[in-house]
């Protein structure tokens, strides 16, 4: 990793410790968004326990050490850590590149999250360098392909729907509706459709509401401000089940307060 000392999870995590059988018992709730199958083997389970309690450094290290078995937990830990707990732009970029490389290792298999996490990493990387620049580098097509592949492999993947909704919104916002449609197949209508499907599949998701709100503001401006505000307020009221969800909820609260 590019930095030897990782920032600690900044909130109390007592409620997010899933020792022993508690991990499997709560797995469907914890992975309602990404449909990750419950893993076999204590070592990879321990990596996921570290991830859920917010020990992203341990999750990344343990996951990487397991090779293909731990690639998803490592990539997800790196993506979430870099998204929320890293401020330095160059460090973020390096981490997202690392996560994308990890996810690529599993893309020859029918592993939906290998494709989703690849798109997540490239999407966050694109935001670091500017979406317009990322589109010019051809990353838009790669992100869309990875997300559509994830949904082909797992049609109930709510997080992939969220990411595709954000993709459509970002592209339309940056280059305009007509060019977005002709060049990238992106549209306002598709963005809304993906967000609505994500909320249907995973109604407890704070991040679905936040990304939906952001998209409405980008695409429709003041005409959708009331709906966007309501979505953020709903997100702030969500009850987090793990560290990632806590970071989502705290971000929603900060947005409302700010």
Image (spheres, helix red, strand yellow):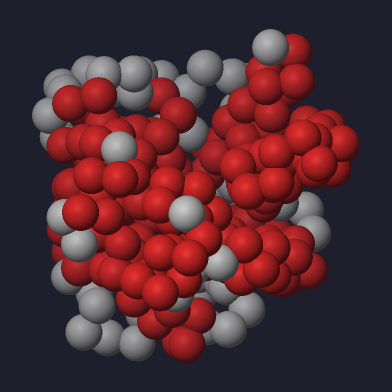
Q: Residue furthest top?
A: 258
Q: Residue at x 45, y 29 (%)?
A: 84
Q: Residue furthest front?
A: 178
Please tell me which residue lies in front, 108 or 27. 108
Relative to 15, 124 lies left or right: left
**Whether residue 5 can be seen here:** yes
* Quadrant of the drawing holding the N terminus: top left
Please tell me which residue lies in front, 175 or 78. 175
* Residue 130 in picture, x, y percent from top left: 30, 38
Q: Residue at x 59, y 19 (%)?
A: 11
* Residue 171 in picture, x, y percent from top left: 44, 55
* Quadrant of the drawing holding the C terminus: top right
* Residue 35 in picture, x, y percent from top left: 56, 71
Q: Where on the picture, by quarter, is residue 188?
A: bottom right
Q: Residue at x 16, y 37 (%)?
A: 94
- Relative height, residue 172 to residue 227 (above, below): below
Please tell me which residue lies in front, 8 or 17. 8
Relative to 18, 227 lies left or right: right
């Amino acid at each position: 990793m590019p930095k030897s000392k990782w920032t600690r999870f900044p909130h109390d995590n007592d409620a997010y410790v899933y020792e022993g059988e508690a991990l499997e018992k709560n797995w469907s709730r914890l992975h309602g968004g990404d449909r990750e199958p419950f893993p076999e083997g204590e070592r990879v389970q321990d990596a996921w326990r570290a991830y859920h309690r917010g020990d992203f450094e341990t999750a990344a290290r343990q996951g990487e050490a397991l090779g293909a078995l731990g690639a998803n937990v490592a990539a997800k830990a790196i993506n979430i850590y870099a998204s929320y707990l890293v401020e330095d732009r160059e460090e973020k970029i390096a981490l997202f590149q690392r996560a994308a490389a990890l996810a690529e290792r599993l893309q020859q298999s029918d592993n939906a999250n290998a494709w989703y996490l690849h798109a997540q990493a490239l999407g966050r990387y694109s935001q670091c360098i500017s979406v317009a620049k990322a589109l010019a580098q051809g990353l838009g097509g790669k992100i869309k392909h990875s997300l559509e592949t994830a949904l082909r492999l797992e049609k109930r993947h709510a997080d992939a729907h969220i990411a595709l909704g954000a993709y459509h919104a970002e592209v339309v916002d940056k280059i305009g509706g007509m060019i977005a449609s002709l060049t990238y197949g992106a549209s306002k209508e598709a963005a809304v459709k993906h967000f609505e499907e994500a909320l249907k599949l995973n109604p407890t998701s704070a991040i679905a509401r936040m990304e939906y709100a952001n998209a409405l503001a980008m695409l429709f401006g003041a005409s959708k401000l009331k709906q966007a505000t309501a979505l953020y307020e709903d997100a702030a009221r969500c009850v987090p089940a793990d560290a990632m969800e806590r970071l989502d909820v705290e971000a929603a609260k900060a947005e409302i307060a700010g």
